[in-house]
Amino acid sequence: MELFKDPKFDFLGKKRWFIALSLLLMGVGAASLIIKGGPRYGIDFRGGIEMYVRFVQLPPIDQIRAAISRQVKGEVMVQEVVGHNEVLVSLEMRSEEELAQARQEMIQALAARFAPDPTKPDLNNSGTEAITAGLRQAVIERGLPLSDEEIQQIAARIREFRDTPPRSGLIRDFQELTQVQGVTPQVIAALRERFTLAPFTIQSVEIVGPKIGEELRHQALMATLLALGGMLVYIAFRFEWIYGVAAVVAVFHDVWITLGLFSLTNREISLTVVAALLTLVGYSMNDTIVIFDRVRENLKILKRMPFEQLVNLSVNQTLNRTVLTSGLTFLTVLALFLFGGPVLNNFAFALVVGIIVGTYSSVFIASPIVVFWQNFSEGRKKAPVSARTTPSGREVKGSVKTAR
């Protein structure tokens, strides 16, 4: 499939404009990182608790923040997850000891503020064992004819029913449980007596200690640097060292601009984002190698063509492949960004930016660097203006015509 038939775009003729654009984007990103004191690290790297809470109807963010702040030490950050009646509650911890009790304190704080009866265990946030224990006690008090095995089976079915869509962890009324096998009106009455139904459920909780976060941050940095170093060695071995340098500079350019956009949009750097950056490194490098490989092939065929013109021709010859590959990949990651949900949003954002910047840098960053070096090398190899010395010792400069 050919989108462009015999394209002849003068990409390198406009290289100065695109290099200026890259320098502007890198400068703006660097300024944002300096002003904000570096990247905004996620819980993975700074240590703490990150909890997704889903509500029946999303209450004001200020109420959630105030309820948790009264119970838990430290700065509480609450962000709304648009369109899902969810909030992301983050709490940075400075010691391992604080992590052990902070999760339970956060849940207790939400229950005290939003649960109808905070003195009772919450059915929406209870595990199978807690549901079994409460139901067993209610059955004994009411004298219901249920064996212990039947109680355990009913508790397991209640939890499974609660956690499957469309409820997804939220039972709004005890009458919904009539759909569960074995749950009779007497069992529902027993559940009402022993449990409350809070209008929220804890979707997920992530806990990372500060020491582990620091270690993960160091390992992520080393992984990125080693990936760049390995690719530099590979390309230098396959082509020439200047090609490796050009490719690594282009990849560094891509990563820097992506991090700058993360800072400008106030997004967090997490382990999934690091995975996206490493994916970006490989993708951008592969696109650059395709162009360099075509340059190498053309050097064998078009030996008399000026090098800049040859590189421009190589870019045009690979243009269809670049647009098709990058275009299809971009549509995929764009769908992931738009519909992948909050957990994958930052990961998908890094890939969306990376596909665009990575394709751009292969043409307008890596290729001009090789052209510049080639022109510089040829300029040094050119013989200086010839100089001859007469018998009298005077130096005569300029060309000498041969007498016939």
Image: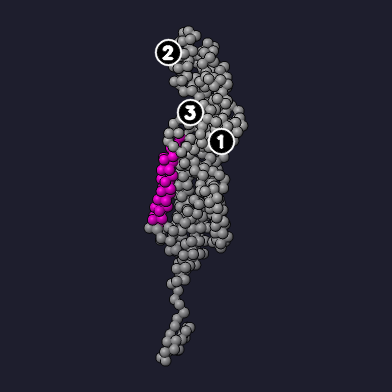
Tell me the quarter of the picture where residue 171 sits: top right
Residue 209 on the magenta span: yes
Q: Residues within 10 Å of mark 1 (few under 14, many from 20)?
A: some
Residue corresponding to mark 1: 78
Give the percent coordinates (x, y) of residue 97. 43, 34
Residue 347, given in percent of the width and then of the height, sits at: 50, 42
Which picture quadrant has residue 167? Answer: top right
Q: Which mark is residue 45?
A: none
- Coordinates of residue 23 in the picture (x, y in percent): 54, 57
In terms of secondary structure, where does tag 2 sit? helix
Label disc, if present, on residue 148 of the rendered structure: 2
Instruction: Give amino acid for label 3.
Output: Gln
Q: Which residues are magenta?
A: 207-235
Q: Amino acid at mark 2?
A: Asp
Nearer the camera: disc 2 or disc 1: 1
Q: Which residue is rendered at x = 57% and y = 19% of the image?
A: 173
Q: CA distance from mark 2 to mark 1?
A: 42 Å
Question: Could you tell me the amino acid type at mark 1?
Answer: Val
Residue at the spot 45% in from the left edge and 17% down from the top edge? 133
Position above or below: 110 against 209? above
Disc 3 to disc 2, how far (Cα)? 29 Å
- Would you say the residues marked 3 and 2 are in contact, meaning their CB atoms lie under 8 Å apart? no
Q: What secondary structure is found at the residue carrying circle 1?
A: strand
Q: Earlier in the sequence, mark 3 or mark 1?
A: 1
